[in-house]
Each structure stands twice: as structure tokens, then as C-alpha cells.
Amino acid sequence: MIVFTAIALIGTLSYFYFILYILSGLRRLKPAEGLQHYPSVSVIIAARNEATNLPALLTSLLSQDYPTEKLEILISDDRSTDNSWEIIQSFQKNSAKIIGIRVSEESDSMTPKKNALSQAIEQSSGEIIVTTDGDCRVQSTWVKSMVEAIGDKAGICVGFSAVE
């Protein structure tokens, strides 16, 4: 019984020490100062047979909290057999920010997804390129948070977007 009590006491103390350690680290965090400069951003998406997911993704990308004139969305339709291309064209007609690219042939030197991404990147004009997949959703602050995370010193940044 004494051994069990000692183990429980050590576990409890360790847990509280860990919580205090985390809280002290959180107190040292400085709040984000926000962006002083808004670089142009190209959002790149390679999509294949994503007709069921594209409307929600494109809607979430169009609702970004980022200057409209600094954002472009390039979506590369990688030989879809569903109506993905029609959905892309529909969104493209309603927003100048969306640029649809139709990939019709496979590359001999790249996988299909790399080829689709490469074709979109070649046509992009943003200072920063961020990518997501056709089955993801992004919050309205996604682009802004990615730009803040990259800052002036980073060359690459990996972030989170939910898959639904």
C-alpha cells in the first residue's frame, strides 16, 4: 500500500510540475505583432476528382482575411474524370482571384501531383507560395498566419488545415 501511495504521489507531483512548466512557457510568449508588410501570396492546389470537396475549399479560400489584391488561388485540375473542372470554372467566373489550370497529359519525369503543382507554380506570381489539398478546409486566417509564420527569415513553413 505504501508503494502504491508513493507512486501515486510522485505521479501527481510530476503532473503538476509539467502543468506549471507549460504555463510558465506560455507566459513568456510574446503576442503576435501582426503583419507590417503584406507580401503577395499564391495559393496552389492540385486536385484530381475532388468535385465533392472543391466548393467548400474554394469558398474557404475566398473568405481569407488577407488583402484581396495580394492573393491569387491557382487550382490545377489533374485529369479529373468527375466535374471538378466545371466547378473550378464556375468559381473562376465569379472571382478574379481564382486561376484554373487544366492538366491533360502526364509527365514522363514527375508524378501526376508534382506535375500539377509544378504547372500551377510556373503560372503563379506571388512572393510566397502556400499549398493545400483539394480535400482540406482552411480557416479565414490561414493565409495570414502562414505569412506571419514565414516572416522575414524562414524559407519554408508547414502548417495545419483540416481534412473533412
Image (tube, grey):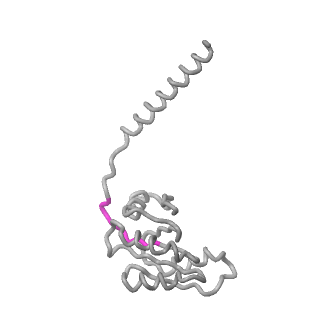
Residue 76 at what x, y percent from top left?
53, 79
- Given residues 62 and 117, the one toward you in this image is 62
Image point (46%, 70%), residue name: 57
Relative to residue 139, is residue 13 depicted above or below?
above
**Image quadrant in which you'd find residue 115:** bottom right
Q: Magenta region's main secondary structure?
A: loop
Residue 26 at what x, y percent from top left?
39, 39
Image point (31%, 53%), residue name: 33
- 112 horizontally vs 9: left or right: right
> Residue placed farthest to the right in the image?
108
Residue 37 at what x, y percent from top left?
32, 64
Verify whether residue 38 appears in magenta.
yes
Image point (61%, 18%), residue name: 4
Relative to residue 42, is residue 88 depicted above or below?
below
Verify whether residue 100 appears in magenta.
no
- Given residues 101 and 58, the one toward you in this image is 58
**Image quadrant in which you'd find residue 66:** bottom left
- 144 horizontally vs 112: left or right: left
Relative to residue 102, is residue 45 depicted above or below?
above
For the N terminus, give its image quadrant. Answer: top right
- Point out the stretch of residues depicted in magenta: 35-43
Relative to residue 157, is residue 88 depicted above or below?
below
